[in-house]
Amino acid sequence: MPGDVHPEVEDPGAEHARYWRFSGLPETELLTARFVTTAFTRHTHPTYTIGVITNGVEEYSHARGRERVGPGGLAVVGPGEVHTGHAGVPEGWGYRVFYPSPDVVTGIARELGMRGTPGFTESGIHAPEAARVLATAHMAAERGDRLASSSLARQGLGMLLRSHGRERVPDPLRRTARPEVERARRLLAERLVDPPTLEELASRLGIGPFALSRAFRAVHGLPPHAYLNQLRVERARALLASGRRAGEVAVEVGFADQPHLTRHFKRHLGVPPGAYQRALLSS
């Protein structure tokens, strides 16, 4: 059995973050990072977020409340779940994060006999054995040991699903949401570069601006303007991963310029777009 998740000793004032593709699981990225002053705005990921805290404390809010997770704990957020993130202690926090796609987690759940789309009973999770296995898998991936990392990652995710997994309960609000909200979401996705004003969007959909903003936030967890920036950042990630230059990407996804992209990118991912791209392409 892999050893304990030992706290990682680092310069108390230093921040660093590195994303890379994980060849051991399809459509999965990894992050190793330490943050002190970095704070994440309300945002979502299309993937699961499963982080093993290695030192310090991360504090974050999500749809079900607020969490404080320390060394050896797991911070787990589902796809599309709005959350934040910041240091819970002055020295910040370090963690190793998996971003597995819904298909990957669902596939592992199927092998365990679980039905439906997997969710988790908690967000801040105490599961020491699963945390140890996942941390060891992450370190093996960093060393380039593909067999060990892929085997241990699946083992750790399976352990986590067994101990804290459940069938994800569909949000009744999403099922019964006004059709105008879905139409608004599609319009924003289609018009990243030249989005309508809230008034124009509401007028096109035949409802009031305040009613649209309130209904949109109730369904997606973000108001339309913040959701638009989320879409822009996700599109920028895909373009950067394909090798496109950050300045070109900024304009293509609707940001005013590269500094504008960088500000939003760092608020969502903790790293500037150039560093994200270099690490991803090098892996």
Image (cartoon, helix red, strand yellow):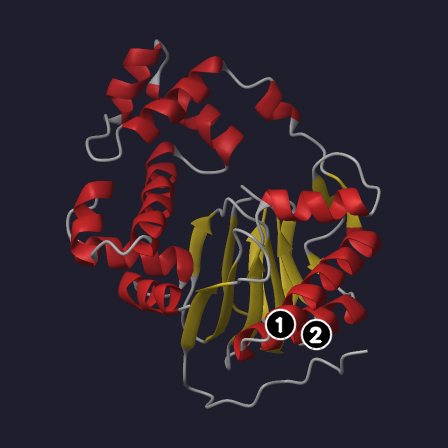
Q: Position of residue 165 (x, y in %)?
A: 78, 48
For marks 1 and 2, the one nearer the N-term is 1
The amino acid beneath tag 2 is: Gly
Residue highlighted by disc 1: 53
Q: Position of residue 107 (x, y in %)?
A: 70, 44
Q: Position of residue 3 (x, y in %)?
A: 76, 83
Asked if 31 appears above or below 239 in the picture, the reply is below
Q: Picture quarter containing residue 130?
A: bottom right
SS class of the residue under badge 2? Answer: loop
Q: Position of residue 126 (x, y in %)?
A: 76, 65
Residue highlighted by disc 2: 72
Q: Is residue 146 or residue 65 the one in the foreground?
A: 146
SS class of the residue under badge 1? Answer: strand
Alpha carbon distance from label 1 to label 2: 6 Å
Verify CB contact (< 8 Å) between mark 1 and mark 2. yes
Tell whether 9 sits left or right of 130.
left
Q: Is residue 142 or residue 223 the one in the foreground?
A: 142
Q: How many marks?
A: 2
The amino acid beneath tag 1 is: Ile
Q: Would you call the spot at circle 1 few (<14 residues within 10 Å), some (14-19), or many (20 or more)?
A: many
Is there any visible trace of residue 20 in the rendered image?
yes
Q: Quadrant of the C terminus?
A: bottom left
